[in-house]
Image: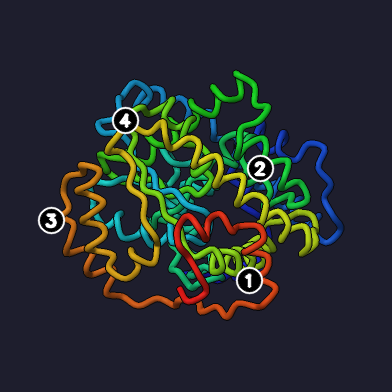
Amino acid sequence: MGILSFDKLPANTLVGADWRTFKETVRDREIDPGYRTKYRVTKAVCRLLSAAAPIQEKRYEKMLADKPLENPPVFILGHWRSGTTFTHNVLSCDRHFGYVTTYQTVFPHLMLWGQPFFKTVMNWLIPSKRPTDNVVLGPDLPQEEEFAMTNLLPYSYYDFWFFPRHQREYAEKYLLFKGMTREQMEEFRRKYVQLVKIALWNTGGTQFLSKNPPHTAHVRELLEIFPDAKFIYLIRNPYTVFESTRKFYDKTIRSLMLQNFSEEEMESAILDIYTWMYDKYEADKKLVPQGNLFEMKFEDFEADPVGMAGKIYSSLGLQGFEEARPAMEKYTGQSYNKNKYRYQDRTVRLVEEHWGYALKQWDYGLAR
């Protein structure tokens, strides 16, 4: 699988958007020279595939719209590069959990029909591993749903992957939800519930398991949709998070972006957005009902993933851990490439100047 590499993708993930979302996302945005061919290919494929979106809407209304959720969703929270992917992969070994797949993130409008064909094409084309850490990719594997949201409505923070010079603007509007209208928030809620129901139908799960870093700033808004939702929050050594996020952005964004940006812009945005998201989470977590929030250091989970998974199940009142344990043990017995970081003096200075509050609150230092 995977005849293409990330740096040679001829289009970006907006190929799976509906036409209205595509048009509003790119409106008033500059496409830089060097990316115009990618933009045209993306636009052409999107225009073709988006004709199928009304078919799915009709099938959704008939099949799933009125079907209630059996269990409250479980949300894995944490800043990018805080171990949310590994945690998601471990917990999703429990087959009672349903989740958004990589295929659904790219083609959310081609779920209830046409999926076998388009999934085969996707499996043939997409890279087999993530460029930053060699995590295996595949159409049916768990993925974060924010990429799907970029294709469902034009109000996603991940629009910055396409237009990185507007990252701060997207963060204020769609990460912190500042200035969103009532109609826009209602559309966000409606589309998100639709995403969850289709994901459960697709994976055969009875409880939705989300891994979506932007949701770290959406606790209040998620509770408005799912009052009994459960949350798992991960924190990781901020020195590592900074180095890893910078590397992740640099490698991933180049396969998606339609305009250039400077490393200084990216670095400054990383430093500020970490704080914005951290502060909103700390303010909103007080709204979570007692017993519905489990916080942990990723280093503790990484050291004993199955044991920590048991603690998560016990703390949040989740069922089925013993049945899922063998699959979790099998998955965690596999090796994966763990990036090692040697922190530059400049990194240490920036993290201590900007994220000192996190170092202090969670007792982190250079040794860990």
Residue 112, percent from left and from top: 41, 37
Residue labelled with disc 3:
322
Question: Gap between marks 1 and 3, in whole Å?
Answer: 42 Å
At label 1, which amino acid type do we have?
Answer: Val
Secondary structure at numbered mark 2 = helix
At label 3, which amino acid type do we have?
Answer: Glu
Whether residues under marks 1 and 4 lie with C-beta atoms below 8 angstroms apart, the answer is no
Question: Gap between marks 2 and 1, in whole Å?
Answer: 25 Å
Front-most of residues 368 and 177? 368
Q: Earlier in the sequence, mark 2 or mark 4?
A: 2
For label 4, count other residues whose C-alpha is less than 10 Å away and answer few (under 14), some (14-19) or many (20+): some
At label 4, which amino acid type do we have?
Answer: Asp
For label 2, count other residues whose C-alpha is less than 10 Å away and answer few (under 14), some (14-19) or many (20+): many
Q: Residue at x 23, y 46 (%)?
A: 315
Residue labelled with disc 2:
171
Residue labelled with disc 1:
348
Q: Is residue 160 left or right of residue 108?
A: right
Compared to 352, does 57 lie above or below? above
Q: Residue at x 60, y 19 (%)?
A: 183
Question: Gap between marks 3 and 4, in whole Å?
Answer: 23 Å
Front-most of residues 347 and 301? 347
Residue labelled with disc 4:
228
Secondary structure at numbered mark 1 = helix
